[in-house]
Image (tube, grey):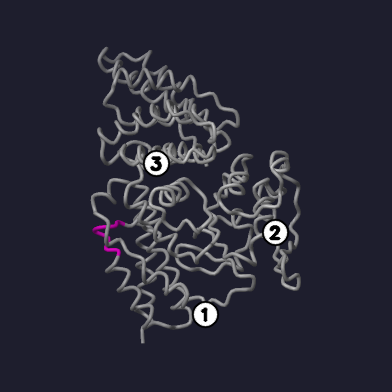
Amino acid sequence: MRYFVCNFMRLFITIIAILTSTLSFSQVSTSIQTVIADSGKHEFKLQARKDTADYSKAFRILTNQVQLNPKNAESRYFLGYTIDRLNADDGKGMFQLKRELTIKASEQFEEVNRLEPVYKGEVFILDPYSKLSSIWGSLAEAYLNRKLIDSAKWAFAEGKKRGGFIEPILEFNRQLLSSCETNAILITYGDIVTIPIWYLQTIENYRTDITVVDASLINTKWYPKYLKADRNLKISFSDAAIDTIEFIQWDAQQVTVTNLIDTTQSFSWELRPTYMDSYILKGDRILLDIFQQNLFSRPIYFSNYSDSTYTLFLSPYLTDQGLVNKVIPKVIDWNTNVLTINSNINHYNIDKLLKDDILKSKDAVNLLNGFRWCYYNTIYYLISPSKYDKAKELITQMNKKFNKDKLPFISIDAEQYFIELFKQADKNYR
């Protein structure tokens, strides 16, 4: 998702007001510098909204801003983002990433972390620590796609050395992977989950039995071919077909996946349009094929809290197992499902993590709060059928394992959700 916050007219009016003001020279100079300091960020976000972006102007402006004020962490943050977008604007160009531009982008984010170990400026999508993981992990994946294993390991190690792949993010994803059965397919979305998992599987050789499928990258030409050739994933489309397959117009309809070995077994659900209420995308068609080829031979999971368009509207058939949702080809019985969730969440913890490592990264705080939401869902399921004893037990367990002094809630509103749920358990407790 791309964001656009600045208002060009407001900037224009501000400049006119400065030029016509009767304020002293020093006051005018300060105001002009404020407008100039914001213009590079404004230009970057302007281009980020476009289908065909040109970041050259943003690069020139931000480079000048950093030269004028090298201690401005926010300018360096957006310059790093700009350089990264010049390297590859999106996942389609990931396989062509250039090492030199990766290093230049990395240097900006490294300096941001040196200037402000807890970044205080505006965040575009990822915080500086996560962005370091993203740019180095993407370069590593580009090497993996070309079967340059040693180069990929170097890129991952370099990203770690320069401040990416921080332990709170890695530990969360270790526990996410541990939530899956052997030989599973795990469908993820977003750099903050997919890329650390690549690191864990490549550097730590952790849960390499799991095939990770990024729901965004599956729309590219290169990534499905990589999954076929190097990640042990059955896809029936030929490489030539993957190059030419496109989105298609789609009306809500039943789709059926049949067991290729035992054709008496099948699974049907209603697939609605995933884009603009009228289409399904290339990636959706490939994902459907992945289901057809693998559903009855391998466990399939989605990372939790995925949008329904990424889960192909399979919500009635997703069993909540903590950090992941497993696809079950039958309507879920939520009463029995609670037991499965509880067996997973009992193992979740942040015992090995340091408080300072968590607090320096907003993304780490947000991600680790995923543990709390696993508890929230389970407690909610328990309260509904009046299983108050177990609900109270889990509330106590959650508060002890995820103390808010070590792991803050993501917001006051989020904390209030938990408080209200806990009050309900207390009010009805027998």
Magenta region, residue range = 402-408
Mark 1 → mark 3, Cα distance in angstroms: 41 Å
Query: At 35% across and 61% down in the image, what residue appears?
Result: 415
Give, as a three-letter code, the residue at label 2.
Answer: Leu
- Element on which disc 2 rests: strand
Mark 3 → mark 2, Cα distance in angstroms: 38 Å
- Element on which disc 1 rests: helix
Q: Which residue is mark 2?
A: 271
Q: Crowding near pointer 2: few (<14 within 10 Å), some, many (20+)? A: some
Q: Is residue 322 above or below residue 137?
A: below
Percent coordinates x, y for residue 140 in the rendering: 45, 39
Apparent side of residue 430 relative to residue 400 in the rendered image (left or right): right
Mark 2 → mark 1, Cα distance in angstroms: 26 Å
Q: Where residue 156 is drawn, which disc sits there?
A: 3
Circles 1, 3 touching at the beta carbon (< 8 Å): no
- Front label number (1 vs 3): 3
Apparent side of residue 177 relative to residue 329 in the rendered image (left or right): left
Apparent side of residue 367 relative to residue 256 in the rendered image (left or right): left
Q: Which residue is mark 1?
A: 336
